[in-house]
Image (cartoon, rainbow, N blue to C red):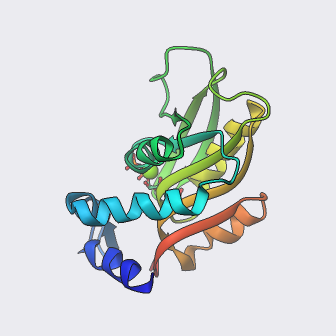
Amino acid sequence: TAQQLEFLKDSIKSVPDYPKPGILFRDVTSLLEDPRAFATTIDLFIERFRDRGITKVVGTEARGFLFGAPVALGLGVGFVPVRKPGKLPRETYSETYDLEYGSDQLELHRDAIKPGDVVLVVDDLLATGGTIEATAKLIRRAGGEVKDAAFVINLFDLNGEARLNALGIDCYSLVAFPGH
Ligand code: PRP
Ligand code: MG
């Protein structure tokens, strides 16, 4: 409901001049600290994606783990982490991507996604969409289908949603803020 979404928005603290002067940082850790806000977030994701044929949830290191793992439990499917380089012990696929503040690499266990898997990607925040574009590429290389991504926050004027839509990914987000 609109009231639940307003409550979630209010639970997210805004930090001026982080990580650099002029940036107003939306800090999702304050939402996590509030058990009612955290539970509401996870319930809304589960409600939306239950009975949609999802077979795996993928969360991207680090903040995607915090929301992806409980959503996987709620949907009754496995959780698969996408990680920063060198952290996964088995054979991986690797993708380089541009970040809001730099560039990085992400990896996925090759055998964690099977052809025919229908994957929901979960992350805390959508900015430029680079992180989730790289995540979706990894899943697709492994043979998985990615049609949906869920976010707590969408920094809507950074146009990540249009970028992901162009890749055939629908974006579901709970709270919108301007990104600059
Ligand atoms: C943040 C955030 C998203 C990503 C969004 O992650 O958690 O994953 O940026 O930006 P984008 O849409 O422009 O790619 P970050 O890389 O800062 O790392 P963290 O999750 O490990 O904190
Ligand atoms: Mg992240």
Question: In which image quadrant can residue 128 be found?
Answer: bottom right
Please state which of residues 58 and 51 is positioned toward the viewer in this rendering: 51
Against 70, residue 159 (above or below) is below
Q: How many marks?
A: 0
Q: Is residue 23 left or right of residue 83?
A: left
Horizontal side, residue 168 vs residue 139: left or right: right
Pick out the residue farthest to the top: 90
Q: Residue at x 49, y 15 (%)?
A: 89
The percent position of residue 176, horizontal first and vertical second, equals 47, 78
Residue at x 68%, y 37% (from the top left corner): 138
Quadrant in which ligand 1 is drawn = bottom left
Q: Is residue 128 above or below residue 144?
A: below
Residue 125 sits above or below residue 55 on the image: below
Residue appearing at x 51%, y 56% in the figure = 46
Within the image, what quadrant is residue 168 found in? bottom right
What x and y, as percent, mark residue 109? 60, 24
Instruction: Name the residue nearer the viewer: 55 or 165.
Output: 55
Q: Residue 158 location, x and y as percent?
A: 56, 73
